[in-house]
Image: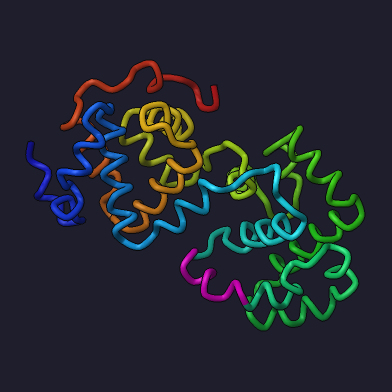
Amino acid sequence: MELGHYKSGAQFWASNSVMARAASASGLAKAYLMAKDFVIRSGFQNEIDWQDGLSFETVSETDFLREMAWVVLSAGFREAVLRKRFHLISKSFLNWSSAREISHAAQTCRTQAMKVFNHRQKIDAILHNVRLVCQAGFPEIKSRIEHQGVQFLQELTFVGSITAFHLAKNLGLSVVKPDRHLVRTAKATGYACPTSMCEAIASVVAERISVVDVVIWRYATLDPDYETWFSKVARQLNPCPDEKHANRPCGS
């Protein structure tokens, strides 16, 4: 089986131990486990552990405000750059102590945040969402998320149809974010959408679909040829895709 010509690192991570763990998996799941091994070797084990450890039941007001702000700011912005600035942004917003405290100090928070992240619309969107939490109360907001999920999150300012899935996932809900990396990987491997692809993998490797999501997303940021790699390796390891999942409508 010729995999080693991929300069992105297949020789590095197609180790005997990885292949042993993938022995009973489908072709795509085997490729996923190899990609996961590479992501871990690249220093992102904590990112996987963080995603796996999320639970919506334990989400606090501070957690919600922080993750809401992260999603608002990250839209169309490089994750690596935002990560370097986010601690200062958090400090500007009182480390997300509470919606009430931030609302009371809104002008000061806005002024300080703009010094770190000069995007008026996004900073104002965060403050608008903070006021919503302050007015409704976090228990009500959390209840609406629990019962309405992504549909409610899309009502937040500067949270769209795709980034709502990002926020839901970061709050511990069992969803997949249909961003460009996941959409392209699903298409390259013959799946109708990212959700059906991640569900197919998760059913084999016994992991949360949100974890499968973050592994594939992170791998895509590390390998510019991720679409070609997933497509070819999955077919080499198993030329017969799982039709049960491959043709399912997204979210079914």
In percent of width and height, residue 171 lies at 64, 48
In percent of width and height, residue 115 lies at 67, 83
Q: Which quadrant would residue 9 be assigned to in this image?
A: bottom left
Is 96 placed above or below 140 here? Answer: below
Q: Nearer the viewer, residue 105 or 205?
A: 205
Instruction: Identify the image's colour scheme: rainbow, by chain, secondary structure or one colour.
Output: rainbow
**Total marks in image:** 0
Is 168 placed above or below 26 here? Answer: below
Query: Image check: 153 left or right of 17?
Result: right
Point out the image quarter for the N terminus. top left
Residue 114 inside the magenta-drawn segment:
no
Which residue corresponds to the image point at 88% horizontal and 64% vertical from the top-left? 100
For the record, the magenta segment spans: 79-87
In percent of width and height, residue 147 lies at 76, 32
In percent of width and height, residue 185 lies at 36, 40
Point out the image quarter for the C terminus. top right
Q: Which quadrant would residue 24 be assigned to in this image?
A: top left
Q: Nearer the viewer, residue 132 or 52?
A: 52
Q: Nearer the viewer, residue 71 or 138?
A: 138
Residue 81 inside the magenta-drawn segment:
yes
Which residue corresponds to the image point at 20% horizontal and 26% vertical from the top-left? 238
Which residue corresponds to the image point at 9% horizontal and 50% vertical from the top-left? 5
Query: Image check: 172 left or right of 6?
Result: right
Which residue corresponds to the image point at 29% horizontal and 58% vertical from the top-left? 41
Name the outermost residue toward the top.
244
What secondary structure is the stretch in magenta mostly built from? helix
Q: Which quadrant would residue 235 be assigned to in this image?
A: top left
